[in-house]
Amino acid sequence: FLTLGTTVEATAAALAATHRDLLVVTNSSAAARILGAAPGMRVHLLGGAWQARNGGVSGATAAEMAARWRCDALITGTG
């Protein structure tokens, strides 16, 4: 699962450049755009309220959708 932020966007770019055939779940429209352009990537962007200030998706719908997934790793920023 990838959350929001510039660190996560940089990580998404690194994953896109070095990995294939990953399934990524995110609430970041920026990470989804970066990973979605890479061959073999499967991206699930959560639904919910889109935040223009950071490109994230949040709210009850996003939380409910995230709860449906069991991801192997979480990549998040600290800012």
Image (cartoon, helix red, strand yellow):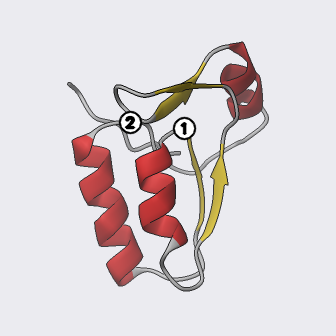
**Image: 56 above or below 26:** above
> Which quadrant of the structure image shows residue 77?
top left
Outermost residue on the top side: it is 60
Query: Residue 37, how many percent across, how many down?
Result: 49, 75
Q: Which residue is mark 2?
A: 4
Query: Residue 51, how many percent across, how many down?
Result: 47, 24
Asked whether the residues under the numbered discs 2 and 1 touch, taking CB atoms below 8 Å apart as contact, a structural biologist would say: yes
Q: Which residue is mark 1?
A: 27
Disc 1, SS: loop
Outermost residue on the front side: it is 52
Query: Residue 65, how many percent across, how many down?
Result: 75, 31
> Which quadrant of the structure image shows residue 64?
top right
In the visual, does 39 lie left or right of 76?
right
Query: Residue 5, how many percent across, how many down?
Result: 30, 37
Local packing at callout 2 (Cα closer than 10 Å; few below 14, some 14-19, many 20+) is: many
Disc 2, SS: loop
The amino acid on which the numbered mark 2 sits, given as a three-letter code, is Leu
Q: How many labels were placed on the picture?
A: 2
